[in-house]
């Protein structure tokens, strides 16, 4: 089954679907003895939205997912799906299905038997079961494998069977707990595209758990970045990447330069800061960022330029930092320069490679160089 990826206008409309809540978490807390796994998380997931819970191991993302599915009960707070409170409703009585990393397929059943299992338990008639199993397998691009056993399938095919089994019951919500973690890199990337297309095709709300930042950026309508049981930032992939609110989010999502600075002045949504070597920069501010004193400045390597790239007058309206070239590293798709500032702090610059003629940089290690920074690309962070 081929599903078209939506246009930007369609994606915008889907993001607006948060106005129609599918899942609501209201100050949800989960403790295991003295350990607080989830700390008063409040979250609204729109109907049909693909939301990813992203964070390192132990941040509370899987526990949050399990509470939505009914496998764990919240210590306090409320969970609602389509407006109905689910706190004490068991998993089989929630409009939810879950796909786990280990697939959890029954080895003694055929593919068709695995997919039809939930329908059998619900008492669906045989003819209807067969029709819905065929539709589900077609949806995950696995027609013609109904009579095979799970052991006869590849890892990717087994994952698709697990997805078909979850989708065949037509759940309002599909929970996915790191379902691609056991797949090799190439297959994982292919399945990311297929999952995103499935989300749009079936219209169910997807809540996806992962610690893989690239996976979250590639698949999600929105991302909730979690740490120590709390949601630190919630937004679209672009918002999370381009406008991180604090040091943890900036450092966890992609590669970034984190520079220690001193706030000199705040002017509206702009700040003037002093880098530890004494050079002054202009940057964006974020909610909660310091208005004076020590702070952290974040800027992505690909948003930086070398003065030599822009010419002698290029970028003069922007900030620049003087330093010396420490290292030039060719990485295939891009080249990385490491520039050492006078105070010993290093800053990394990336430039995409477009051909052999553009790979080289005439400067050698130890030579003076200027790094140019667009003020819109540098963000003063809340700690």
Image: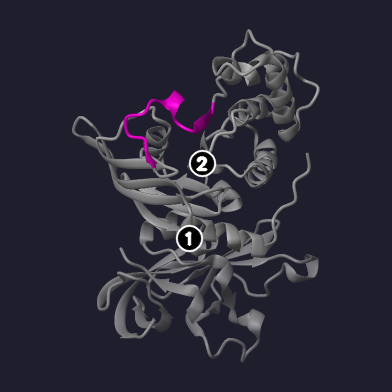
- Quadrant showing the N terminus: top right
Q: Which of marks 1 and 2 is in front?
A: 2
Q: Does the magenta stretch include residue 94?
A: yes
Task: Locate residue 33: give its quadrant.
Answer: top left
Task: Locate residue 329: give its quadrant.
Answer: bottom right
Task: Locate residue 122: give its quadrant.
Answer: top right
Q: Which residue is drawn at 76% across and 66% down?
A: 354
Tell me the number on the disc at residue 2: none
Residue 180 image point, x, y percent: 59, 34
- Left or right placement of residue 323 versus residue 365 in this view: left
**Distance of mark 1 from mark 2, alpha carbons?**
16 Å
Residue in front for this viewpoint, 350 or 380? 380
- Left or right placement of residue 292 versus residue 67 in this view: left
Q: Is 9 situated above or below 277?
A: above
Going by the picture, which residue comes out furthest to the top? 108
Q: Is 248 situated above or below 374?
A: above
Residue 269 image point, x, y percent: 39, 81
Which residue is disc 2 drawn over?
A: 208
User: How crowded is the residue under tag 1: few (<14 C-alpha within 10 Å), some, or many (20+)?
Assistant: many
State the extent of the magenta-drawn residues as a range: 84-101
Q: Which residue is drawn at 50% across and 78% down?
A: 376
Residue in front for this viewpoint, 11 or 168? 168
Q: Is residue 328 magenta?
A: no
Colour approach in the figure: one colour
User: How crowded is the residue under tag 2: few (<14 C-alpha within 10 Å), some, or many (20+)?
Assistant: many
Q: Which residue is drawn at 46% across and 50% down?
A: 45
Question: Of helix, strand and loop, which one carries label 1?
Answer: helix
Residue 138 image point, x, y percent: 75, 31
Which residue is disc 1 drawn over?
A: 240
């Amino acid at each position: 089954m081929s599903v078209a990826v939506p246009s930007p206008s369609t994606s915008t409309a889907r993001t607006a679907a948060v106005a129609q809540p599918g899942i609501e978490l209201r100050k949800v807390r989960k403790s295991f003895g003295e350990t607080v796994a989830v700390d008063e998380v409040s979250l609204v997931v729109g109907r049909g939205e693909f939301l990813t819970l992203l964070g390192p191991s132990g941040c509370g993302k899987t526990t949050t997912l399990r509470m939505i599915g009914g496998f764990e009960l919240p210590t306090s707070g409320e969970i609602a799906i389509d407006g109905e409170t689910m706190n004490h409703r068991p998993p089989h009585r929630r409009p939810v299905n879950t796909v786990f990393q280990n697939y959890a397929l029954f080895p003694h059943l055929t593919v068709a038997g695995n997919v039809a299992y939930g329908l059998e338990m619900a008492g669906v008639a045989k003819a209807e079961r067969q029709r819905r199993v065929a539709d589900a397998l077609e949806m995950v691009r696995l027609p013609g494998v109904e009579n095979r056993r799970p052991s006869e399938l590849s890892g990717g095919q087994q994952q698709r069977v697990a997805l078909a089994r979850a989708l065949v019951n037509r759940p309002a919500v599909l929970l996915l707990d790191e379902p691609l973690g056991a797949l090799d890199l190439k297959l994982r990337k292919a399945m990311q595209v297929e999952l995103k297309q499935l989300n749009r095709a079936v219209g169910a709300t997807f809540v996806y758990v992962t610690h893989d930042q690239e996976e979250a950026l590639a698949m999600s309508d929105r991302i909730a970045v979690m740490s120590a049981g709390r949601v630190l930032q919630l937004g679209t992939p672009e918002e999370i990447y381009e406008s991180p609110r604090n040091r943890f989010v900036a450092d966890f999502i992609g590669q970034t330069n984190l520079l220690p600075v001193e706030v000199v002045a705040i002017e509206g949504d702009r700040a003037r800061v002093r880098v530890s070597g004494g050079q002054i920069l202009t940057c964006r501010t974020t909610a909660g960022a310091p208005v004076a004193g020590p702070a952290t400045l974040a800027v992505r390597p690909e948003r930086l330029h070398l003065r030599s790239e822009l010419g002698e007058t290029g970028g003069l309206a922007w900030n620049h930092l003087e330093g010396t070239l420490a290292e030039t590293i060719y990485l295939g798709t891009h080249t990385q320069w490491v520039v050492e500032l006078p105070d010993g702090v290093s800053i990394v610059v990336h430039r995409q490679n477009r051909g052999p003629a553009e790979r080289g940089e005439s400067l050698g290690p130890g030579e003076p160089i200027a790094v140019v920074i667009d003020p819109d690309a540098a963000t003063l962070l809340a700690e």
